[in-house]
Image (tube, helix red, strand yellow):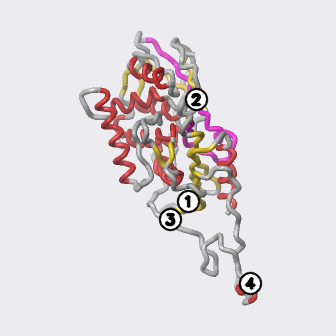
Amino acid sequence: MGSHARPNRIHRTGARIATVALFGAALPISAAGLAQAATPSTAHSVDVNGRQTGEAATTADQNQGAPVTKVQAAPNVKADHAFLLDARDGSQEREMWAGAKADESVSMASTTKIMTALVVLKQPERLDQQITVKQEYRDYVQQVGASTADLQTGDKLTVKQLLHAMLIPSGADAARALADNFGSGDTEDARIADFVSQMNAEAQQLGLTGTHFDGYDGISNGDNRSTARDLAKLGQRAMLKPVFADVVKNEQFETEATAANGRIRYYTWTNTNQLLGTYDGALGIKTGSGPEAGYAVVFAAERDNRTLVGAILGTDQTRFEDATKMLDWGFAR
């Protein structure tokens, strides 16, 4: 545990565990990621008689002796704000299943940080740049009750380390540090506002029409929202970045930083994505929760050279159970 206490209350963007110590050993970061292209488009499965999958075979079809493809039922999940796509085809993303409210824009909590990372990774040459933790970053976490990586004032961490701090324990302090340093302006507020504008510009470029950001960490100012369909597509795009994919697969991550007094400080961050380590082939991606948003998860898994990406929003603590059912259903097709 760090030398400063973390906020005691449950944060509004998802419970995370962050441990800071002045001793320990760093674990190496492996290089891995997806190498699939993604072009926004939708393809529906069609049976041999030309019907979209989900339509029942008619008696006439059967009487005529036409071969009929057996229709597979939709996944039995509780979440309505849910979407699943198949990213195995290098030329397009294939919609597999959409919940009843897959296109309804709702609060997305800490899944916001997927876009925060994507904007930062547009400048990969800065990954080794060191950023000094300001007291303002810690103060912000205390003021809004956000999740934290328990970054210590004066410590120096690289951009890549801050990505781990943001995506694994969902540190809003790390997210603020990145927004402050990747935005333009003469003041911290101006730089953060510019960074959020970059997030919205990226969403528009990716065709995420049901998505709008009013912050960088999921603490909403009244208009921070997305759809399950948009977030699944965003998750797929982010997983095409090897650095991003390498970060979000970690169940736990240890690293060292230079403290303000020149000593080495060791950080340990634990991921609360319960799919990691429990679901065969799980790759990440990001969880979130809050009083307004409920529980959310953007997830990905790979089996037999197929990668499925999905999103669940506005549900309860059954999010991982539903994600498991969706993945099982998708891989069985």
Sequence-first disc among 4 and 1: 4
Toward the viewer: 303 or 214? 214
State the residue position of label 1. Answer: 88
| Residue reaching furthest to the left | 186
At label 1, the amino acid type is Arg
Q: In the structure shown, which secondary structural element does the residue marked by tag 1 occupy?
A: loop
Toward the viewer: 27 or 66? 66
User: For the residues marked 2 and 3, what is the alpha-carbon distance in whole angstroms?
Assistant: 34 Å
At label 2, the amino acid type is Arg
Q: Give the label, 2 or 1, closer to the camera.
A: 2
State the residue position of label 4. Answer: 59
Q: Residue at x 62, y 44 (%)?
A: 315
Q: In the structure shown, which secondary structural element does the residue marked by tag 4 occupy?
A: helix
Q: Is residue 184 above or below residue 310?
A: above
Proximity of marks 3 and 4: CB atoms separated by less than 8 Å? no
State the residue position of label 3. Answer: 42
Q: Quadrant of residue 318?
A: top right
The disc placed on residue 14 is none
User: For the residues marked 4 and 2, what is the alpha-carbon distance in whole angstroms?
Assistant: 54 Å
Sequence-first disc among 3 and 4: 3
Sequence-first disc among 3 and 1: 3
